[in-house]
Amino acid sequence: MLEYKTEVWPVDKKIAEDENCPQITQASLWIKKNEVIAFPTETVYGLGGNAKSDAAIEKIFLAKGRPSDNPLIVHVASREQLIGMVSSIPERAKKLMDAFWPGPLTLVLPKGEDVSERVTAGLSTVAVRMPDHPVALKLIKECGLPLAAPSANVSGRPSPTTAQHVHEDLKGRIPGILDGGVTGVGVESTVVDCTAETLVILRPGGVTKEQLEVVAGETMMDPGLLNEQAAPKSPGMKYTHYAPDAPLFLVDGSPSFLQELVDKQKGAGLKTGVLTTEENAPFYKADAVIPCGSRGKLESVAHHLYDALRAFNESGVDIIYGEVFPKSGVGAAIMNRLEKSAGGQIIKE
Ligand code: TXA
Ligand code: MG
């Protein structure tokens, strides 16, 4: 399995469209040979391969250790590249593309003829998005292929927001990583199902429900996201995800209640961690107190979330307690990821 040298290719994330970039040329040569490489997007790093090639997609699943019934998102650099990937684009989907592309919105549409069956895991639909990142767009244009790309982490681990995170997870498993620095949004794209009458959010993300409603009218959350009993429509949402090595418990209560929980575990001889914000960090006494953005600015929490979850692994704690956030705006995505990281374990005061 560990058959590659895994080169890291630094690239300026502000690279101009017409600028020559040997690192991107190198990466696109690998893609054209149906190998897979990691690249930055505005949300998280992706692990990209030719969306038309079964062999390339096979390598993505293998490198990540991803269950094969979990379909991938196809990334394009222009709407022309959707030809063959999707079989039709309803009016509402066009409006959403006008409003949010390039950007963190993934649309589920009827599948086209040229997309590998492995990408869609046998579904009749395909998820597509145009990333808002000069390096991603340039790579897709240069290889001239739509790229199927999941997040570039080992399945189950927090998604990567830096090239170092990718390297930690996929070293030896892929030929290279385009290093465009830290990503912006920090959580993945919003996935919406455009095939039903009402727009349905299958995975909350960088584009909020409130923003979608302005463009598409009534928008609902997939019942599978809100209720443990209903099966989620986005296959990926059923798996354990984004988990640090130590168990995480979310705490819906005051900082002093959370500190009491920490003290109890300390008493039992465990090494404790607290996932908090800049505002509350000074309050806690634990082995690792890791602040994740500012409570006053949820975008900053999203930006730092996965790095904070990964940092607990380095601190070697036995148990982590994390604060909760309001579920409005990008808070919906933050809480969706935190609830998954915690495997649904929430302690109420
Ligand atoms: O921001 C992002 O979306 C990142 C970057 C790299 O673009 N990608 C990403 O991919 O998060 P991944 O594979 O980690 O998540 C894809 C999600 C999964 O939950 C999957 O089940 C869902 O999209 N998905 C893909 N195709 C689908 C389809 N046809 N129907 C429903 N859900 C689908
Ligand atoms: Mg992922």
Image (tube, rainbow, N blue to C red):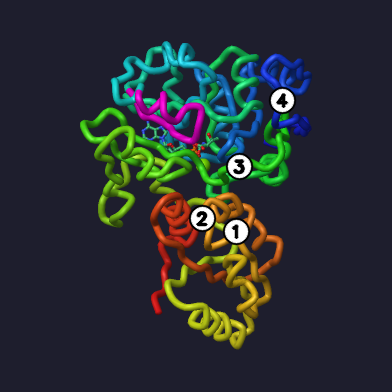
Residue designated by label 2: 298
> Crowding near pointer 1: few (<14 within 10 Å), some, many (20+)?
many
Q: Secondary structure at mark 1?
A: loop
Magenta part of the chain: 95-109
Q: Position of residue 171 (x, y in %)?
A: 72, 40
Residue position marked by numbered label 3 in the rendering: 184
Residue toward you, 83 or 330: 330
Nearer-the-camera pick, 332 or 168: 332
User: Between disc 2 and disc 4, whose residue precedes?
Assistant: 4
Residue at which label 4 appears: 15
- Mark-to-mark CA distance, 3 and 4: 16 Å
- Looking at marks 1 and 4 on the same chain, the residue that comes earlier in the sequence is marked by 4
Task: Tell me the CA gap for discs 1 and 4.
Answer: 28 Å
The amino acid type of the residue labelled 2 equals Leu
Q: CA distance from mark 3 to mark 1?
A: 13 Å
Secondary element at tag 4? loop
Residue 28 drawn above or below residue 268: above
Tag 3 secondary structure: loop
Q: Which residue type does callout 3 highlight?
A: Gly
Question: Type of residue at label 4?
Answer: Ile
For marks 3 and 1 on the same chain, the one whose residue lies earlier in the sequence: 3
The reply to whether the magenta stretch includes residue 112 is no
Mark 1: amino acid? Gly
State if disc 2 and disc 1 touch (CB < 8 Å).
Answer: yes
Residue tagged by mark 1? 293
* Residue at point 78%, 19% (across, down): 22
- Residue 8: x and y in percent read 77, 34
Spatial CA span between label 2 and label 4: 28 Å
Quarter of the picture holding the N terminus: top right
Dot 2 or dot 3, earlier in sequence: 3
Q: Quadrant of residue 91?
A: top left
